[in-house]
Amino acid sequence: MTAHLSRRSLLGLAGAGAGALLLGACGDDKAEDPNAPQTINWWHIQNTEPMLPVWAAMAKEYETAHSNVKVTVQPLENEAFKAKLTTATQAGSPPDLFQSWGGGVLKQQVDAGLVKDLTDDVKPWIGNLLPASVQPFTIDGKIYGVPFDIGMVGFWYNKDLFAKARVTAAPKTWAELLTAVGRIKAAGVVPIALAGKEKWPGHYYWAYLAMRIGGLGALQQAAKDHNFDTPDFVAAGQRLKELVDLKPFQKGFLGAGYGTPDGQAATMGNGGAAMELMGQWAPAVEASSSTSKKGLGDKLGFFPFPAVDGGKGSVAEAFGGGNGFAVGKNAPAATVDFLKTLLEVGNQRKAAATGAVLPTVKDAVDGIKDPNNKTVAETLASATGFQLYLDQAYPPAVGQQVNDSVAELIAGSKTPEQIVKDITTVAKSQ
């Protein structure tokens, strides 16, 4: 993963909001007896191989070393997790330790007094992590979550299918990508796998196009002005419609999930499509979702999202984020110590070795074995700017509307002009 020094300067909208509330509940924990019986209720979304058993083993190891602590693990699929967490937080009872991407969603939880301020607890060891990875979890100068993974979204492609279609080089511009899609389709190959049912994979296209056309400044300005009805965001939709009009996705993509047996990752892992636009976890999920359980192996390649001719954004600007954990307001005393254990160098190396995690602990980056993950890490290391996933960077209602609106554009039920108006309406209501 090389030196990664430039990761430290990565920019992000995440956590830029002001007005975070200090949590009164935090002070009560000081009086808790650390030796008293405790149960940590842990929700995470690594609900498949390879990370599912890794997390389970770490929880068991912690229980063995701390006889008074029980860790109840609840693995959940991404969308199921979001729905369940929404119900729990609305009831004012978040789990003790739970998946977080930081950004606008975490800020809303902070403002509602649902999560603990971890600043003082993590001070002795947070410096072991890449500073850029901590940024989405830092709100108003205080740390409310800890990242275990940092990465970016890009195109994963099947080298054999590219060769079959005589696409000899990774597309560097949007026009070249559209040309490649046409060639791949003409060769009788599905160009792109997409989980249309889950919506969040589709938003990656529109978000990246908005970045390439308007630059990071356009996304930051939209957050300030609560306005997406601008020429840059309309153009992003128009460019995406160019792709959609080529009918590049697999049959039944509108009903396809991401990690299901017939979903996006499986389609790629089984050689059923030439490309997918996905985060750094893609190779691992493709493998676990594939019939062989091995995926494409060395047939899989990676390239950054291409530039758009005339756009203000640079191909060196990355879009993505990190997975992390936040601590619920009523979590038992051992929770932060357990979280610290998950972030120990040895455990981060174990996570990195699965290929599903790009570690945030600086000394664990040598644990990355997968060549594609090394490529992602090197691409990130040279990034000149960074944007958190829009469905996490913006307030939850805005992020959900982005996902819904982009899905409508891809399905052909809304125009580029209509979706920016719908997103703006929600943004102005926040």
Image (cartoon, rainbow, N blue to C red):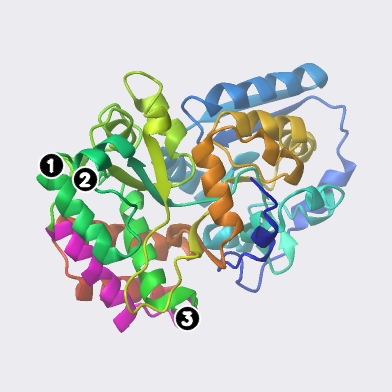
**Callout 2: helix, strand or loop?**
loop
Give the image quarter of residue 300: top left
**Callout 1: helix, strand or loop?**
loop
For the residues labelled 1 and 2, the Cα–Cα distance comes to 9 Å
For the residues labelled 3 and 2, the Cα–Cα distance comes to 41 Å
The reply to whether the C-beta atoms of the residues labelled 1 and 2 are less than 8 Å apart is yes
Between 169 and 222, the one lying in front of the other is 169
Could you tell me residue 269's position as x and y percent?
A: 33, 30
Which mark lies nearer to you, 1 or 2? 2
Residue 160 in the figure: left or right of residue 313: left
Tell how many labels.
3
Q: Which residue is mark 3?
A: 221
Is residue 187 something one can see in this rendering? Answer: yes
Q: Which residue is mark 1?
A: 187
Magenta stretch holds residue 233: yes
- The disc labelled 2 sits on which kind of residue? Arg
Query: Of the residues under marks 3 and 2, which one precedes in the sequence?
Result: 2
Say if 206 sits above or below 49 in the image. Answer: below
Q: Which disc number belongs to residue 166?
A: 2
Between 269 and 29, the one lying in front of the other is 269
- Magenta residues, as a range? 222-245
Which mark lies nearer to you, 3 or 2? 2
Give the image quarter of residue 139: bottom right
Could you tell me residue 190's position as x and y percent?
A: 18, 41
Is residue 322 something one can see in this rendering? Answer: no
Dominant secondary structure, magenta = helix
